[in-house]
Amino acid sequence: MNTKYFRYVEGVAILDSRLKVGKRQHTEFYFYIGQDDAALLSGTREGQKGAPLVRNVRVGSRFGRIRCIDATKIDDVRGDNQRAWVTANQVWPEYVTVIFNNKHLDVRKKIHYGKDLPIDVTAAIQFGNNQFSVSIIAPQTEDPTEYAVGLETIQLIDAAGAKGLTKVLPYEEARQRILRRLQNDDPDIEVVNSCVVINMSDPYTSRIWNIPMRGRSCRHDQCFDLDTFLETRTSKRPGQPCDPDEFKCPICGGDARPQSLVKDEFFEVLRAELAQRDRLDANAIVMQPDGTWEVQDEEKTGETGDGSGKRPGGPRAESAAGATTREGNSTGGPIEVIEID
């Protein structure tokens, strides 16, 4: 079986100044690349007659990419809030120019490509000092849109490397994460159903997962299977590494890059106990405020199975989000060739 490879956003350096469509604006960004880091950048070579450039890469290769997002409603996209950056859609202002190391770059927009696309600048990055600038060249308008521009570092890894970046949510911490939702100290809220129904199905297979994972910032309790998640990351061409933007939670759309994934030890123990009871066919469990739980058969829950807790034709049932309430008042490895668009 062929080894599967993945590209993921390792980090991003975001320009301090936001671009505002309503006025002409020019912002610059400078950065330095050391010799060791420059050696990790994937190289390019000419393809066969009439073919596009090809890129020789290996596990650990790095790529550079400039991306722009609509940040009007986002307070900050740096530091711990980079998850807002990586899950936002790529979008360019209508009138914009990008120059990287004195070379004008092609800004690929929806009108020609079906959607706005980021700019790969791997081949333009050089050892030593680098500089790129972004300019808004439109006449002044009252458009309040603000854009954030950043330079992403993307790394190529294999499945073992992806799994090695994941973290673990310890058993008791994961258990208390659920139980806290069943505790209510607000006198204005009356709890009418003190148990919580937890969906135990992987959203891809509709069966219980083998390795329960979710994003660190996900608010839901439902997990997805790690191996299935990695296997379903797709690429533009068969046999090529997956696109960096594929790492989004299949349940909520949140940040699910390898370094943002956590394995839930509480759910891992639940699965082992269900296996002992010969109940790996269970779709959901019901958990009480004291931490005890029992299998909730599918015909009793009547849930849609999508993790939302919705019941067909009925009101929303509280699932992983909490109780129902009523308001009162590696390096090395094989060589991979990627065609460059």
Image (cartoon, rainbow, N blue to C red):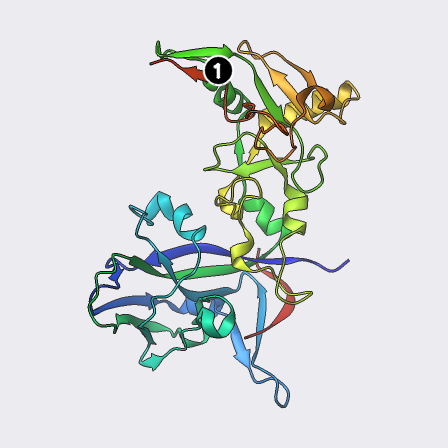
Q: Nearer the viewer, residue 97 or 301?
A: 301
- Mark 1: which secondary structure? helix
Q: Amino acid at mark 1?
A: Leu
Residue situated in front as seen by the camera: 80 or 330? 80
Question: What is the x, y in percent for residue 14?
Answer: 32, 57
Q: Going 68% across and 45% down the picture, which residue do you hit? A: 228
Q: Which of these two is toward me, 33 or 217? A: 217
Picture coordinates of residue 58, whole percent (x, y):
59, 65
Up/down of 1 relative to 189, above or below: below
- Residue 79 vertical placement versus 56 (above, below): above
Rendered image quadrant of residue 51: bottom right
Q: Residue at 25% across / 68% down in the picture?
A: 28
The quadrant of the image that shows the N terminus is bottom right
Q: Is residue 47 above or below residue 199?
A: below
Quadrant of the drawing holding the C terminus:
bottom right
Q: Is residue 111 above or below residue 229?
A: below
Image quadrant in which you'd find residue 55: bottom right
How far across and down, in percent of the image, does residue 266 sit? 59, 24
143 relative position to 110: left or right: left
Label tally: 1
Q: Quadrant of residue 310?
A: top right
The x and y percentages for residue 244 are: 52, 58
Is residue 240 rendered to the left or right of residue 145? right
Query: Extreme front residue here?
Result: 313
Lateral position of residue 91 relative to residue 18, left or right = right
Q: Residues within 10 Å of mark 1 (few under 14, many from 20)?
A: many
Q: Circle 1 is placed at which residue position?
A: 182
Farthest residue to the right: give it. Answer: 278
Residue at 49% over, 64% down = 62
| Residue shown at the point (41%, 60%) measured from the top left | 152
